[in-house]
Image (cartoon, grey):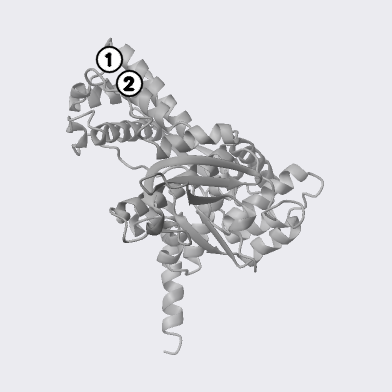
Amino acid sequence: MATTKYYLKKPKPNGNCLISLYFRYGTEQVVVSTNQFIKQKSWDPKNQKAKASHEAYLELNANLDRWRNEIQKIYQQRLYQKLPITPADLKPLFEREIRTDKYEAAPQKGKPGLAEFIGKYIQSVEGFKNANTIKTYRSHLKMLMEFQADTKKKSIAFNDITLDFYHDFKRFMVEVKKYNENTQNKHTGLLKFFLNEATERKENDNIEFKSRRFSTPRKDVDSIYLNEDEIKLLMKLDLSAESRLEKVRDLFIVGCFTGLRFSDLTTIQAENISPDFKYLKMKTIKTDEFLEIPIHPIVRKVMEKYKGRTPNHLPPAISNQKMNEYLKEIGEKANLSDDIALFEKKGKVRTQKKVSKFSLITSHTARRSFATNEYLAGTPSYAIMAITGHRTEKAFLTYIKVTKKQYAHQLSEIWKERFKDE
């Protein structure tokens, strides 16, 4: 179990003690100086914080809490990304988070262009953000450089980003890159994300991108969910002769009854599970939110199956890419072959094709299935949202896959129960 503690060094002649952070995991330890000093009498060792007698104690305690959370987050992310976690690898990352005085960027002559800013931003968050997120950022930067070359510009200055720029950018994505609507919207959203980051960091003062006409219209994606009967079909499959598929199926089932993202599902530690096996308590990697999820009886059965085989009593994790590949194979074996209509629009051309449902199953299908099935079963939206992390009911209802027919049936059942004595 990884722990973060603060300890005081020996007092200096003036009575001040340096606060050091000690991060322990397994048999390893990383020690980082916080460059913060405090009198021994003003330190509360039990609660790991400064007493009210210390000047600026509120600010110091806020920093201590933030550093503790960020250090844990860095460690969990590297576990998830399967990156080295030796003390030599972790210490510079921890210092970079805590000792900002050592890692201040040198002042720049003039402001960087858009592509230069994005490149430096990516460098600054590597090791902190999910590997797939970094990959997405790099892909966007590559496309932006291609657009820059297409417009014969040496650099795109922030002041160049006007509505005319936006229309040229959209034209490039449609006519040159042949992107569909979802990919266009993804890149427009990323562009606005980086422009917001640049604005926050005082690198950009052009806010024309905030215009409503500089829009990223939302479009429903071609995603599916599995209903409870379909999940039961997966559970009944005899995969004992194919352990690679059996483990993936079991992990997917856990996802269907916890609602966790793949990144969280595959980094559950033994200490995240309550001793009585009734609750799962953890912080999410993507949003850094604390979750407390009741362990479903079906999940408990999976844990009993893997008890003694893995440290966390759950199927071993594999890469997201491999899991998605195996899930399609499992779905086909379970005969989840309903026809699903897919619509795609490139430019002004809209096409339709039909595919079998199993070909659309991914690791994320488990999370969407959890949210949709719980909603249809009558679980209050706020209870589901507390687990999925959706901040508004509008966003949640957009996320789940409920048809108008299902809504009508749900209302009919409510009326039937309400007026059963009339």
Q: Residue at x 18, y 33 (%)?
A: 207
- Residue 321 picture location, percent across and down: 60, 35
Q: Amino acid at mark 2?
A: Ala
Q: Nearer the viewer, residue 169 or 222?
A: 169
Pointer 1 with pointer 2, Cβ within 8 A: yes
Mark drawn on residue 155: 1
Mark 1 to mark 2 CA distance (whole Å): 7 Å
Does 113 appear above or below 135?
A: above
Q: Nearer the viewer, residue 120 or 402?
A: 120
The answer to whether residue 142 is left or right of residue 117 is right
Q: Residue at x 65, y 40 (%)?
A: 318
Say which element carries label 1.
Answer: loop
Q: Residue at x 26, y 18 (%)?
A: 156
Label 2 packing within 10 angstroms: few (<14), some (14-19), many (20+): many
- Quarter of the figure with residue 254: bottom right
Q: Is residue 230 visible?
A: no
Quadrant where the C terminus sits is bottom left
Q: Is residue 306 visible?
A: yes
Residue furthest out toward the right = 241
- Mark toward the start of the polypeptide (1 vs 2): 2
The answer to whether residue 56 is left or right of residue 76 is left
- Residue 277 picture location, percent across and down: 64, 66
Q: Which residue is mark 2?
A: 115
Q: Residue at x 36, y 31 (%)?
A: 187
Label 1 packing within 10 angstroms: few (<14), some (14-19), many (20+): some
Does 185 appear above or below 40?
A: above
Q: Nearer the viewer, residue 382 or 10?
A: 10
Q: Amino acid at mark 1?
A: Ser
Mark drawn on residue 389: none
Q: Nearer the viewer, residue 142 or 151?
A: 142
- Residue 289 picture location, percent across and down: 44, 54
